[in-house]
Image (tube, rainbow, N blue to C red):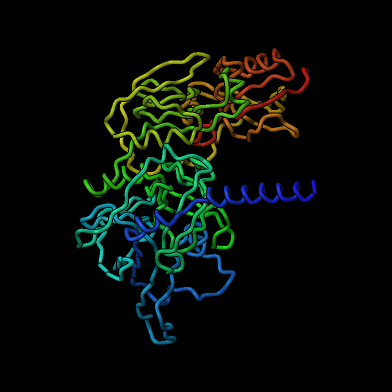
Amino acid sequence: MRTIRALAALWLAAFSIAAVAQRDLPDFTRVVEEQGNAVVNISTTQAVRRSAALPQMPGIEDEEVLEFFRRFIPRQPGPGQPGQGQGPAPRAESRSLGSGFVISQDGYVLTNAHVVEGADEITVKFTDKREFKAKVIGADKRTDIALIKIDATGLPAVRFGDPQKLKVGEWVVAIGSPFGFDNTVTAGIVSAKGRSLPQENFVPFIQTDVAINPGNSGGPLFNMRGEVIGINSQIYSRSGGFMGISFAIPADVALDVQKQLKEKGRVARGRIGVVIQEVTRDLATSFGLDRPRGALVNSVEKGSPAEKADIEATDIIVGFDGKGVESSSDLPRIVGSTRPGTTVPVEVFRKGATKKLQITVGELQEDRVAAAEKPRPEKAEPAQANRLGIVVAELSADQKKDLKVQNGLVVTEVKPGARADVRKGDVLLTVVHKGQHTELKSVDQFNRLLAGLDKSAVITLQVKRGETIAFVTVAGLTDKG
């Protein structure tokens, strides 16, 4: 009898737990019913030369296919095949599909810039089968945001939420047109926030595990209150399809961009004129910083806002405009979102102490790419390898003038097993140890400095390679000679 009662109790407990679990499962129906009508399908056409269209064969690794892996917007050639042996190939249409959503009742729609890029004609289709031709108000490639407009009023529009309040692990819902299937609903959780992606310096992406596929691009990401907190933009995939990792542009970034696009047709971004790198644990140790944080300034552009604000190479920027800089990737976002001409406070860690400065932000005009050329110093007298396993020589007056440096030592030889990750032709400018910065002026000075360090010492070298300046950390030296 006791056994029967015990089994009954266990059965009741299991039933109760299942009932609670069933009750606590998320219900997405309200979000879809309230907001689904504001999500649209976007199709575009673009005139292309048929001869340029590539055959649809597996294994082709052209630029468009690579873009397909990175973005998720399908492009398909129009019907027909190019003629052969008939002179210039006729023109065809390239079609693409994406998603978008209405942000105002008078017809403004947000989507991704890559959805409408190069489009000759844009068609916006609603769930009730109404179709409208759209025009591009403005597009910003750096954030992948585009604002388009249709001639209509009284439209259903979305509500926006605050992505700053979004929590990792929170349920989110995507509505879009994967593979052209209108108003498809998928759901998942927020996997991470503030993700940095290669070549995407201005967007702190929201990472989710929401199923996203070609055609979802530009569609909204909702929280459970039915508020848009992001725009689905990219996926990580090795197949071109969903593999569990997708990225959305935060709504606050999108709203700021669309406001500027609506007012001026372009986006004005701030810049201060510095080259930076991440602060590793070893760099933090050698600079005397309490922990790895901030953006290490490799070089300062001449005449730039940073130079005028007295920011120096080897400074670590730990705060900008009242916002903390935890990672080097934080700085471009914060500076980029600052209006050009604005004067803001900047906090730097310099030679063991924090210093507060004021900087007037300039405007970003174009991407700058550092030259990859190596300096070509004159031949120097050979010297003994030091405790880093490298041979250095002093620069001549002409070399200093050509390299635009006041002092420094050129690496003439790198011995096998060298401790420093430098190359022949590199110029060493300074060495940092326990927050102390020493400008390198002579071979004897450098070697004496190294001779006085413990074998386990962690030092950082400021290295000039061509037009690029970087910091190289060395953890441990060879035995003293």
Question: Which residue does the image show at 65% across and 33% down from the upper left?
Answer: 421
Question: Which residue does the image show at 61% across and 17% down from the upper left?
Answer: 433
In the image, 433 versus 423, the foreground residue is: 433
Question: Which residue does the image show at 40% across and 67% down from the upper left?
Answer: 182
In the image, 329 versus 426, the foreground residue is: 329
Task: Check the image and report above or below for 96 versus 381.
Answer: below
Where does the image place residue 21, in percent across and percent down from the top left? 58, 49
**Residue 301, image quadrant:** top left
Task: Check the image and report above or below for 378 versus 49.
Answer: above
Q: Quadrant of the C terminus?
A: top right
Where does the image place residue 352, in percent across and percent down from the top left? 53, 14
Can see residue 187? yes
* Residue 32 as seen in the image, left or right of residue 56: left
Question: Which residue does the image show at 63% across and 35% down from the upper left?
Answer: 424
* Residue 386 as seen in the image, left or right of residue 101: right
* Residue 360 as seen in the image, left or right of residue 346: left
Count of marks, rendered view: 0
Task: Check the image and report above or below for 113 versus 162.
Answer: below
**Residue 458, image quadrant:** top right
In the image, 7 versus 223, the foreground residue is: 7
Can see residue 117? no
Where does the image place residue 388, in percent across and percent down from the top left? 70, 25
